[in-house]
Image (tube, rainbow, N blue to C red):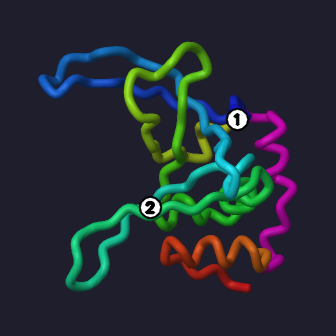
Amino acid sequence: MLLTDIAVEHTLMSPQKVVRGTFLMHPFTNTQRDTFGKFELVRDIREPGFKEVRRSAFVTFQQLAELYAKGVLDEFGFSIRVCPDQGKYPTANPVRKILPANIKTGSPFDLAVQSVDVSKPASRELRAGMLRVNVKLEG
């Protein structure tokens, strides 16, 4: 599933800094067994004494809406794996930071974000998924 309610422009550059194309990118759900139908969130983590590592977690549509509503993605510097809606992207699908301003106002995803009760604690499944990327949600 392509989440077209969220759109961000992405410019592909060659190693020589030549623009190879500009794409309108959207979050998409994974097609692998364990993560089928989930969006990939990516976070760079610097652990003491180690180099920076990139970790990812997979969340459902509703969990993504909850994370946006609670401001978790922006607070912890998450990016989302994206792809274009038309054509094929020439390299591996990139990750992009997507701000709430990139959500189409009045769209089904925007309504899902607005319907989240931020006073309720996150579900056990969501808290467990966020621990993988070193984020502890209150629960």
- The answer to whether residue 22 is magenta is no
Q: Position of residue 120 (x, y in %)?
A: 83, 77
Q: Look at the numbered disc 1 and give the secondary structure of its residue.
A: loop
Image height check: is 91 above or below 56? above
Which residue is more in the foreground, 81 or 113? Answer: 81
Look at 70% across and 35% down and name the residue there: 3
Circle nearer the N terminus (1, 2): 1
Q: Which residue is mark 2?
A: 43
Question: Who's the residue at 68% across and 77% down the image?
Answer: 127
Picture disc at residue 75: none
Label 1 close to label 2 by CB (< 8 Å):
no
Image location of residue 77, percent across then percent down: 45, 60
Residue 123: quadrant of the picture: bottom right
101 or 90, which is in the foreground?
Answer: 90
Query: Does the magenta run of residues contain 106?
Result: yes
Q: Which residue is mark 1?
A: 3
Q: Which residues are magenta?
A: 104-121
* Residue drawn at point x = 67 percent, y = 62 percent: 67
- Residue type (three-letter) at the residue carrying disc 1: Leu
What amino acid is at disc 2?
Answer: Arg
Q: Is residue 3 above or below residue 57?
A: above
Instruction: State the predominant SS element of the stretch in magenta.
Output: loop
